[in-house]
């Protein structure tokens, strides 16, 4: 691997997803985040009311109207979860001591103390068995199941720790019987449909049927909302191939995943999911604790910076910030830092080698069979390399052609020319892609010239440089990609 740039790198390829919180939802702050590199504004529906999230949506749209730079909206569902109950006497926490006995009960009237707590999962005694592990509060306290009797689970505390009110419960290696979509999720998604969000990040997806259930909720499919499946459990990993097939993208949600599976397996799971998404040509987002220390400090740790860089090397389309931008002290600095790390990593990727390797493996996985559209897109990427083109222009209504081009990881930016605002926003999770919205898809040559002029205004193309365009010769017809053209920027 060379540590000098393999091409003249004029724009970041990896997109940045930012979680928006009370301190970052103002229009002025959103403009700062966008200038720093934010492509997608994420709303975490585990927190906040509908009016709060509506204010985020409205402010993002106002920010877009001010600077003209698109930003997509992502609704992240709370999802099904298991939590402990409240503690006795309004205590904030109680100390559990290693080696002591502890009881989990289904009796919701029981208030917790040093010996017991209730949980929201009524089927817990039927789900776990002696020898299983129960983790509470992101795994900070571990329990070993000893026996399950009459709706109660008797355990031994494996490490000393403080148990607070209403903490999350994980059951690593256990198949849980929880609904894919809770009533709260249904209400939140209905709100998202009404507000016109672009993506639903679906929490705790365990099977392909979970994805289908969300897509079949009223309005989701009709609105064209893309579903990003969050893989957060061993069951989700076991069913990953089927989940990927029915999803529009994947989020590697390392928070709960790092509790549900042994921590030493998380990196391999991340690499596997990114690799399979790359082969399938579906966007993948790497998330959780990427620059976590920047919640409180203006610089990340070396390990965090390396983590972001490795995700880019692995092939992620997006990297995500959570608490760093939702509640951190340095939200804009965190985005700028992530932008610099991604840009520097992208500079040294050997794109020609990457293209050759990807194409070989994709053809093998697809038994040598690819569509005409994908073949043209693959050829567009190869042509861009052969001619050292500075830009690939994709004329696409639906954005599917953009995803095909992005799949083969070109060295240069991909400019998606579309007449649909939804498509313009949704390409913002595909690596290297950015949009240009036009009034009509008619007149291919005029669209190419308009795209080149726009790219020149952004400093992505210089006079005399070559531009590769892929489109359909049947103008205005979605899904008819069969044209490859090379132009010179004037």
Image (spheres, rainbow, N blue to C red):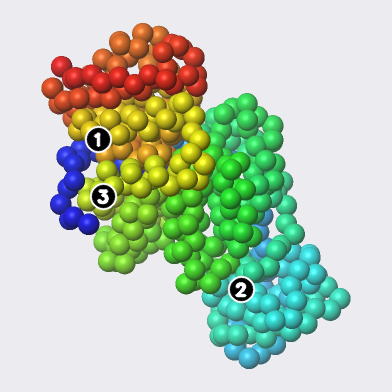
Q: Which of 137 and 25 is in front in this view?
A: 137
In the rendered image, residue 25, in percent from the top left (x then y), is placed at 42, 42
Q: Name the residue under label 1.
A: 385
Q: Name the residue under label 2.
A: 135
In the image, what residue occupies the spot 55% across and 81% down? 161
Crowd band around label 2 with a 10 angstrom C-alpha radius: few (<14), some (14–19), many (20+): some
Q: Mark 3 points at which residue?
A: 349
* Comes first in the chain, label 3 or label 1: 3
In the image, taking residue 428 as reference, residue 301 lies left or right, namely left
Q: State which mark lies toward you, 3 or 1.
A: 1
Q: In which quarter of the image is the C terminus?
A: top left
Q: State which mark lies toward you, 2 or 1.
A: 1
In the image, taking residue 277 as reference, residue 108 lies left or right, namely right
In the rendered image, residue 203, in percent from the top left (x then y), is placed at 59, 51
Q: Provide the secondary structure element on which disc 2 rests.
A: strand
In the rendered image, residue 55, in percent from the top left (x then y), is placed at 49, 37
User: Residue 457, which numbered label?
Assistant: none
* Comes first in the chain, label 3 or label 2: 2
Residue 187 seen anywhere in this rendered image of the structure: no
In the image, what residue occupies the spot 40% across and 45% down? 360
Q: Nearer the viewer, residue 325 or 460?
A: 460
Q: Provide the secondary structure element on which disc 3 rests.
A: loop
């Amino acid at each position: 691997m060379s540590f000098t740039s393999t091409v003249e790198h004029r724009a970041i390829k990896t997109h940045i997803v930012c979680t928006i919180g009370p301190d970052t939802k103002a229009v002025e702050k959103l403009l700062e985040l966008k200038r720093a590199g934010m492509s997608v504004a994420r709303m975490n529906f585990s927190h906040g009311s509908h009016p709060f999230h509506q204010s985020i949506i409205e402010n993002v749209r106002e920010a877009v109207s001010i600077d003209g730079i698109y930003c997509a909206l992502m609704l992240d569902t709370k999802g099904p979860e298991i939590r402990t109950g409240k503690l006795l006497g309004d205590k904030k926490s109680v100390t559990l001591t290693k080696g002591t006995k502890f009881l989990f009960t289904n009796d919701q009237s029981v208030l917790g103390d040093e010996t017991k707590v209730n949980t929201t999962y009524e089927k817990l005694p039927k789900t776990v068995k002696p020898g299983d592990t129960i983790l509470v509060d992101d795994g900070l306290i571990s329990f070993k199941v000893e026996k399950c009797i009459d709706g109660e689970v008797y355990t031994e505390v494996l490490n000393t720790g403080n148990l607070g009110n209403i903490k999350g419960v994980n059951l690593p290696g256990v198949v849980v019987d929880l609904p894919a979509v809770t009533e709260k999720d249904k209400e939140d998604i209905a709100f998202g449909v009404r507000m016109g969000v672009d993506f639903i990040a679906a929490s705790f997806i365990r099977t392909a049927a979970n994805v289908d259930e969300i897509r079949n909720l009223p309005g989701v499919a009709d609105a064209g909302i893309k579903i990003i499946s969050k893989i957060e459990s061993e069951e989700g990993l076991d069913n990953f191939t089927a989940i990927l097939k029915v999803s529009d993208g994947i989020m590697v949600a390392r928070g709960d995943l790092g509790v549900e599976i042994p921590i030493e397996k998380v990196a391999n799971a991340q690499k596997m999911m990114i690799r399979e998404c790359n082969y399938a040509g579906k966007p993948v987002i790497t998330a959780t604790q990427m620059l976590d220390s920047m919640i409180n400090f203006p610089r990340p740790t070396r390990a965090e910076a390396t983590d972001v860089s490795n995700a880019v090397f692995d092939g992620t389309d997006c990297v995500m910030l959570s608490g760093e931008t939702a509640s951190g002290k340095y939200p804009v600095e965190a985005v700028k830092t992530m932008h610099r790390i991604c840009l520097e990593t992208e500079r040294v990727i050997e794109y020609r080698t990457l293209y050759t390797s990807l194409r070989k493996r994709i053809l093998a996985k697809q038994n040598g069979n690819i569509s005409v559209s994908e073949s043209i897109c693959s050829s567009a990427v190869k042509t861009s390399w052969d001619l050292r083109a500075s830009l690939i222009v994709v004329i696409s209504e639906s954005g599917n052609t953009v995803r095909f081009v992005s799949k083969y990881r070109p060295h240069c930016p991909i400019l998606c020319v579309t007449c649909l605002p939804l498509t313009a926003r949704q390409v913002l999770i595909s690596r290297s892609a950015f949009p240009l919205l036009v009034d009509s898809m008619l007149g291919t040559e005029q669209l190419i010239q308009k795209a080149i002029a726009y790219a020149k205004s952004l400093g992505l193309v210089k006079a005399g440089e070559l531009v590769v365009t892929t489109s359909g010769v049947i103008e205005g017809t979605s899904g008819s990609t069969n044209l490859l053209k090379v132009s010179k920027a004037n």
